[in-house]
Amino acid sequence: MEMYDNSEKIQKALLVGIDTGEYDAESSMAELYELVESAAAEPAASIMQKRDKPDGATAIGSGRLDEITSFCSENDIDFIVFDMELTPTQIRNIEQATDVRTIDRTMLILDIFAIRAKTNEGKLQVELAQLKYLLPRLSGKGKEMSRLGGGVGTRGPGETKLETDKRHIRRRIESLKADLNNMKDRRERLRSRRKKDGVITAAIVGYTNAGKSTLMNTLTQAGVLSENKLFATLDPTSRALKLPNGISVMMIDTVGLVRRLPHHLVEAFKSTLEEAAVADIILNVCDASNDEYKLHLEVTRSLLTELGCEGKPVITVYNKCDLVKNPFDLPSSRDSVRICAKEGIGIEELLRKVEENLPIKLRHYKLLFPFDKASVIAVLRQAGALQSEEYTAEGIAVDAVVEESLWHLVDKYSV
C-alpha cells in the first residue's frame, strides 16, 4: 500500500463553489476552508459562481473554467476542491481542462477521516466508506487512476486496492461489513453488560469543532485530542465521571457532525453515533460563538431523531460563551446551560443538569447506624452513594445520596 508522506510540502488548494440557492453557499464555503486546513493543506483562494444548476459536463461554466485553469497555472495550485459532489465525468473533464487533480467535498471529508481514524474499527469504517464511494467511479479511469495515492483526497485504501477489479472491491466491502458487524456485536454485549451492571451513560454529541473533546477533557481529564480542527475526534471515547452527588456516569465522546454530510457517510459512521442512541442522557454541544449555532443544533437534533433518540433527556450545552458578546442573549430553558469548557466556566451547573436528568430516583439521607450495621455502609460505599461518614458516641453518622433500590436498607436509620 502506498503511504502518504507528511514531510512533503504543504499542498495548495483552489476552492470552487456553485451557488444554486439551495443552501447558504458562503457559509458552506467557509466550512470548506476549515476542511481543507484540517486535511493539512493550504486554501490558496476560492471562486464562486451563481448558476441555476451545476453544468453536467464540468459543474462550472466554461468561462469560469478558463479562469480556474489560468489561476492554477500561475499560482502553482496542487489540487482543486469543489464544494459539492462531482460525477466521474465532471472530474475527468475538469482535470483534462486544467491539468490539475480535482476532488470534491466528499473525497475531502473521507481524506480527513482517513487521517483521524486511530482505532481498528475507525480505520475499517473509513475504508468501507471510501470503497463504497469509489466503486461506481472506477470504470473507465485511465489517467485519473495514475494520479491516485499522491495527496489530499487520496489517503486511505491506497493505490493498489483501487487498481484491482470491481469484484475484488465488492468482496472487500462485504468483508469489511462482516468485520464491522462483529465489532458491533461486541459493542452490543458491552452495552448489555453496562446496563446489567447499572452503568448510566451520557453521550456528548454535536457539530464538529463545537468543543466536545475539550468538554470531555474538562469533565473527566480523559486526555482526548482536542484541536481546533474539524473531525478532531473520529473514534468514540468512554470515560467515567463521578457526579457531585456520588453517582458515576460513563461519558462518551462521539464524532462531530457537519452540514451536507452525504448520506452514505452518515451510514458508514453510524456505529460511532449509535452510542448516543443507547445513552441515558445526551449532551448536545454547540459553539455559541458561531453565528450559525442554531442551525448546528438543528442538524444534531435531526440526526438524533434519525437514530431513534426521541424521549431521551437532551441537555443543550452552549459552549465557548466567553467568546459571546452577551451570553445572556442565548436561549434559556430548563434543559440548557451556558459554559466555557476550556476555562471550566459553568461546569457545576452542567453537572447539576446531568444529575437532574439521571434515569434513577435519588434521595439525600442523613443516617445514623449502630456500630454492628457497618455492612450496610459498605453497600452504600460500593454503590458510590456515600458522601461522608463519621464515628460518634451514638453510632456511625453517614451522609449519602441513595438510589431508590436501596431506600429500604436505610429508611429506618434516617435522622
Image (cartoon, helix red, strand yellow):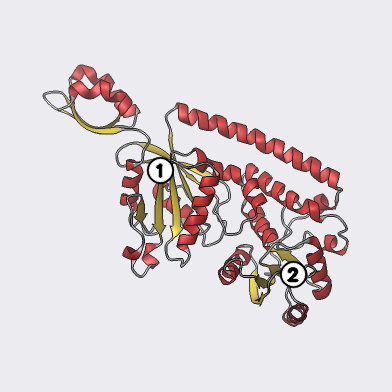
Q: Please provide percent x and percent y for residue 193.
A: 50, 28
Residue 413 got which mark? none
> How many numbered discs, if any?
2
Inspect the image, locate mark 2, and give the three-letter code of the amino acid beneath it.
Answer: Ala
Q: Position of residue 411 (x, y in %)?
A: 21, 23
The percent position of residue 110, horizontal first and vertical second, equals: 67, 56
Residue type at mark 1 is Pro
Residue nearest the viewer, comparing 297 with 346: 297
Determine whether, in the image, residue 275 is placed left or right of residue 69. left
Crowd tier of the residue under label 2, counting other residues whose Cα lies within 10 Å: few below 14, some 14–19, many 20 or above: many
Please tell me the numbered disc located at residue 313: 1
Whether residues under marks 2 and 1 lie with C-beta atoms below 8 angstroms apart, the answer is no
233 vs 140, nearest the viewer: 140
Question: Residue 8 sits in which quadrant?
Answer: bottom right
Mark 1 element type: loop
Based on the displayed image, in which of its 4 quarters is residue 401 positioned? top left
Q: Quadrant of the C terminus?
A: top left
Q: Is residue 337 above or below residue 21?
A: above
Quick check: 379 left or right of 142? Answer: left
Residue at 67% of width from left, 53% of height from top?
114
353 up-or-down from 61: above or below: above
The residue located at (80%, 75%) in the rendering is 98
- Mark 2 — residue? 59
Figure check: 226 above or below 242: below
Can residue 1 be seen here?
A: no
Q: Residues within 10 Å of mark 1 (few under 14, many from 20)?
A: some
Where's residue 353, x and y in %? 33, 46
Badge 2 marks a residue whose secondary structure is loop
Seen at 80% across and 43% down, the residue is: 170
Q: Please identify the residue farthest to the top as the structure is shown.
A: 372
